[in-house]
Image: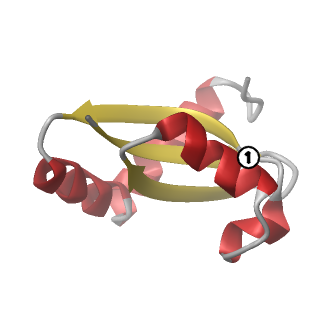
Amino acid sequence: MYYTYAIYSQEFDKIYIGMTNDLERRLYDHNERGRGWTKQYRPWKIIYFESFEVKSEGLVREKEFKSYQGRQFIRAIIASNNGSVG
């Protein structure tokens, strides 16, 4: 199973979109391991994800999330929670 996901840093109002085959481990990596762009905007919370049987379908959806319309979709989820997640 593959997951396309959006995580949110409420403190910095940042969104990160990615894809993985292990959602729990990936969130742990973003929050606990010291590498990459996400390191400086901790803590992260998953605000949305979709699952796919086929990796290529997940990659297509990841690309859609990274578009302007996709980011608007994620921002609407954040707004519906009044900016607070979790």
- Compare residues 54 and 62 and report the one nearer the observer: 54
Image quadrant where one finds the N terminus: top left
Q: Is residue 29 above or below residue 23?
A: below
Image quadrant where one finds the C terminus: top right
The quadrant where residue 41 appears: bottom right
Q: Which residue is mark 1?
A: 44
Residue appearing at x 67%, y 76% in the figure? 36
Residue appearing at x 39%, y 50% in the figure? 20
The quadrant where residue 12 appears: bottom right
Asked if residue 68 lies left or right of residue 7, the reply is left
Q: Residue furthest right?
A: 11
- Compare residues 49 and 20 and report the one nearer the observer: 20
Q: Is residue 36 above or below residue 49?
A: below
Q: Is residue 86 above or below residue 53?
A: above
x, y percentage for residue 35? 72, 74
Asked if residue 55 lies left or right of residue 48, the reply is left
x, y percentage for residue 79? 63, 34
Residue appearing at x 17%, y 51% in the figure? 55
Residue appearing at x 44%, y 44% in the figure? 5
x, y percentage for residue 75? 55, 45
Q: Residue furthest bottom?
A: 36
Q: Residues within 10 Å of mark 1 (few under 14, many from 20)?
A: many
